[in-house]
Image (tube, rainbow, N blue to C red):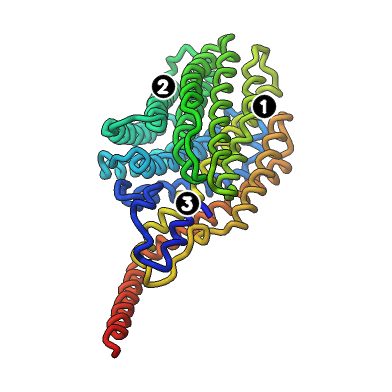
């Protein structure tokens, strides 16, 4: 039983056993209203569901050919903007206040950010699908506006922090990379309409993708993990020197990778090595944190996070292979597809899924059950979702992912049937994960409906009457 589950375990028998300061780990009075991050999570899960459901029907075209085609780019942005970026936005607005001890600068901006983001993502994916760049400029502007509002809001929130640590500095750096990412995206979109860029189109797209994946996603994951993993494992940071060395190396390597890809420069492989060293130091620190934990056993969430981290060696190996100065062959070009899948699905998505197994159930528990403590039994956190379903989801996801990545990487024009089957298996794993997350979220929806509120009021009335009757008995 971990710290979060212990909270709900202690809470059931005695209302005085539950204290708000005990649950300041993920949700506290500093955090915004629960409905704000939840709307991001629901939208992200919906985008992931669409991705998993539709990909098997287009697997041959999306994964069996070179990735510069409109359907592949549409699916990529559905995954990156619709799922990963949306969930990271929601998790950031929830975790930053409680991790750094400050309130969000402006909660109203969060609602506006979500509206522009949802419209922009839906429109941009559709425009990529139909290859309409003039219309895409409008939806791209919506996304740019949503990111600008987000950076402005979190930036002012970070300014309120009294003492900055590794977590806040990593988050600030990821925001800087986010700004550079959407500026690069605007550059690419306008270039498709006006055609003014002197850079190779494929190189510019790859540089933009690495800026988003490494600079924003990886940096945010690294920073947040220094707070969440010690929290979940009941441990602490083991080496500040290791953390800061990793941070310096990573920020030295990411610009080198960006400009190395953009300019097709010979120093690209050196930048890849530097980033690989930074990721190795980060993984070393995470493993040291887990080794020093007070909990005797790792739960499913931390095990899944470790499985996600286990993709880093393969990612580094492919990165070195693709960055090595050699002529671009058909196999090497196709290996880029497997490389992207391992990065975005094997590491980033799997790590985000692992964290959501903690964040979503806890937010639901914190929203619904504290007023019920002492009046009726309340569920434990791990009872809000299915642990067997979590295991099946992970197994199917990994089997489908690695089969798809290997088949897509080793052959040009790979068998459409084999890709359909493998992406279907991966999609089943994703859909099981979505169903598992839907279990706690459905409780939140039912809790918000008027009938549920009426039943809660009626149970309170009955409880007070029963207590009054017992008190009046001789």
Residue furthest to the front in view is: 474
Name the residue nearer the viewer: 373 or 173: 373
Dividing the image into 4 quarters, which one contains the C terminus?
bottom left
Q: Is residue 182 visible?
A: no
Residue at position x 49%, y 28% in the image: 239
Foreground label between 3 and 2 = 3
Name the residue nearer the viewer: 415 or 389: 389
Closer to the chain start, of discs 3 and 1, is 3
Closer to the chain start, of discs 2 and 1, is 2
Asked if the residue under mark 1 is in contact with the one under mark 3, i.e. CB atoms within 8 Å, the reply is no
Residue at position x 49%, y 46% in the image: 232
Q: Identify residue for label 1.
A: 335
In the rendered view, would you say 184 is above or below 168? above
Name the residue nearer the viewer: 168 or 122: 168
Residue at position x 36%, y 33% in the image: 147
* Quarter of the rendering containing residue 321: top right
- Percent across and percent down for residue 318 are 65, 25
Q: Which mark is residue 105?
A: none
Q: Identify residue for label 2.
A: 187
- The answer to whether 460 appears left or right of 9 in the picture is left
- Percent across and percent down for residue 202 are 55, 20
In the rendered view, would you say 380 is above or below 451? above
Q: Identify residue for label 3.
A: 3
Closer to the chain start, of discs 3 and 2, is 3
């Amino acid at each position: 039983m971990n710290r979060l589950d212990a909270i709900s375990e202690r809470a059931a028998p005695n209302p005085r056993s539950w204290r708000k300061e005990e649950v300041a780990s993920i949700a506290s009075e500093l955090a915004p209203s629960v409905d704000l991050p939840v709307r991001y999570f629901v939208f992200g899960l919906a985008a992931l569901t669409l991705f998993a459901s539709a990909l098997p029907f287009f697997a041959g075209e999306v994964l069996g050919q070179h990735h510069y085609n409109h359907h592949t780019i549409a699916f990529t942005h559905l995954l990156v903007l619709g799922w990963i970026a949306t969930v990271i936005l929601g998790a950031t607005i929830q975790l930053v206040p409680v991790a750094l001890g400050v309130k969000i600068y402006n909660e109203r901006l969060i609602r506006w950010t979500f509206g522009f983001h949802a419209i922009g993502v839906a429109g941009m994916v559709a425009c990529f699908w139909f290859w309409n760049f003039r219309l895409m400029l409008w939806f791209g502007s919506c996304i740019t506006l949503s990111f600008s509002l987000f950076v402005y809001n979190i930036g002012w929130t970070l300014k309120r922090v009294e003492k900055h640590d590794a977590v806040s500095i990593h988050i600030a750096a990821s925001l800087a990379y986010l700004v550079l990412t959407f500026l690069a995206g605007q550059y690419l979109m306008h270039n498709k309409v006006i055609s003014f860029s002197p850079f190779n189109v494929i190189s510019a797209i790859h540089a933009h993708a690495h800026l988003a994946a490494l600079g924003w996603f990886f940096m945010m994951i690294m920073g947040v993990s220094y707070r969440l993993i010690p929290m979940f494992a009941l441990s602490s940071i083991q080496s500040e020197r290791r953390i800061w060395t990793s941070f310096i190396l990573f920020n030295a390597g990411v610009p080198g990778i960006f400009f190395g890809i953009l300019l097709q420069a010979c120093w690209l492989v050196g930048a890849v090595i530097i980033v690989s060293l930074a990721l190795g130091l980060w993984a070393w620190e995470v493993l040291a944190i887990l080794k020093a934990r007070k909990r005797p056993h790792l739960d499913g969430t931390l095990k899944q996070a470790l499985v996600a981290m286990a993709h880093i060696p393969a990612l580094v190996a492919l990165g070195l292979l693709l960055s090595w100065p050699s002529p671009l062959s058909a196999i090497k070009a196709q290996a880029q597809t497997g490389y992207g899948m391992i990065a975005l699905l094997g590491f980033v998505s799997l790590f985000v899924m692992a964290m959501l197994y903690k964040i979503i159930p806890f937010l639901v528990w914190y929203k619904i059950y504290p007023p019920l403590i002492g009046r009726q039994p309340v569920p434990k956190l791990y009872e809000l979702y299915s642990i067997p379903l979590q295991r099946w989801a992970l197994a199917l996801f990994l089997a489908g992912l690695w089969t798809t990545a290997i088949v897509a990487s080793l052959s040009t024009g790979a068998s459409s049937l084999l890709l359909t089957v493998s992406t279907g298996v991966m999609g089943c794993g994703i859909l099981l994960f979505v169903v598992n997350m839907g279990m706690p979220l459905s409780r939140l929806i039912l809790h918000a409906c008027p009938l549920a509120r009426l039943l809660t009021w009626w149970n309170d009335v009955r409880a007070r009457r029963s207590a009054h009757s017992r008190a009046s008995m001789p």
